[in-house]
Image (cartoon, rainbow, N blue to C red):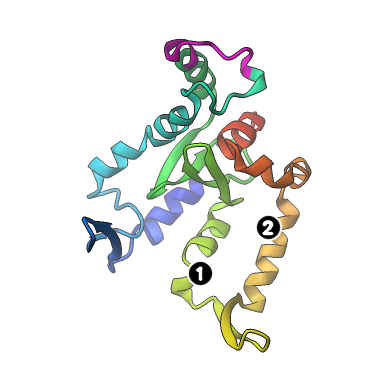
Amino acid sequence: MPEHRAFLRILHTIDRKEVNEYEEDGEIKSYKSSFFYNWLEDEEEIISRLDWSYRTVFADVSPSTSVWLKSWGSRPASVEEKEQIFADWYAKAPKLIPLRSHRFLVSQADLPDRPALSVYGSDTIVYGWDLRLYLLNEIADHLDLYMPVFDVENQCYYPEYTDELKEIFKLEQLKTPRWLLTTSYLKSQVITAIACILSNLY
């Protein structure tokens, strides 16, 4: 994808590492990772992400009372039959390019704008309708794109997007397909981009 090639050429990854914290046995531990994947160094992690969407979405498809699209027909009883149906459908969807963690860029050259998705099983959302909007969403905190606004009623400050960023996101909303805006917030985000968006891309 030309925009992703430009991204890798100009930004690629950043020198500063991101600090990630997690709790284990009641103790807070941390580790550092590249903010965006370093395609010259993070080969093992990138490879592990190439089938992330398949693995995590199918994990939500395989149980007997789980996600199942009407377009797939009747739900089979066996996990093996479910996976065959799912695999056939998934193979027709555009490929996803890993950006960072569980964020991916849709790879389909004939699309005017290629959305970035946040994929965590069936909890999948559009994180930006193109790479630029995705980056503004992803690193707004790091670019000081928020301004503090004082809430008189609650006597506290809360972050609000700058006017410039609000205007950009208004344009993003105008690009959102009308069918998507009328689906009750993607029907609670059930298999949203993987099931609804990707299958409507071609």
Q: Which mark is residue 25?
A: none
Reply above or below: 29 against 53: below
Residue type (three-letter) at the residue carrying disc 1: Ala
| Identity, as a three-letter code, of the amino acid under mark 2 | Glu
The residues bearing labels 2 and 1 have C-alpha atoms spaced at a distance of 15 Å
Identify which residue is drawn at 62% across, 24% down: 69
Earlier-in-chain disc, 2 versus 1: 1
Residue 6: x percent and y percent? 45, 54
Q: Is residue 125 left or right of residue 31?
A: right
Residue farthest to the front?
26
Residue pictured at 53% horizontal, 31% vertical: 94
In the image, residue 159 sits, relative to residue 18, either above or below, namely below
In the displayed structure, 75 sits above or below 9; it is above
Can you say which quadrant of the picture contains the C terminus? top right
Instruction: Please name the residue shown 64% across and 43% down the image.
Output: 188
**Marks 1 and 2: in contact by CB < 8 Å?**
no
Which circle marks residue 140 in the picture?
Answer: 1
Expressed as whole percent of the image width and height from the top left, the position of residue 47 reads 29, 37
Helix, strand or loop at label 2? It is helix
Q: Is residue 74 magenta?
A: yes
- Label 1, residues with CA under 10 Å away: few <14, some 14-19, many ≥20: some
Q: Is residue 169 above or below residue 122?
A: below
Estimate the x, y position of residue 32 in percent, counting from the top left. Answer: 24, 61
**Residue corresponding to mark 2:** 172
Label 1, secondary structure: give it: loop
Q: Residue at x 30, y 48 (%)?
A: 39
Of residue 112 and residue 183, the one placed in the foreground of this image is: 183
Specify the segment rendered in magenta: 72-82
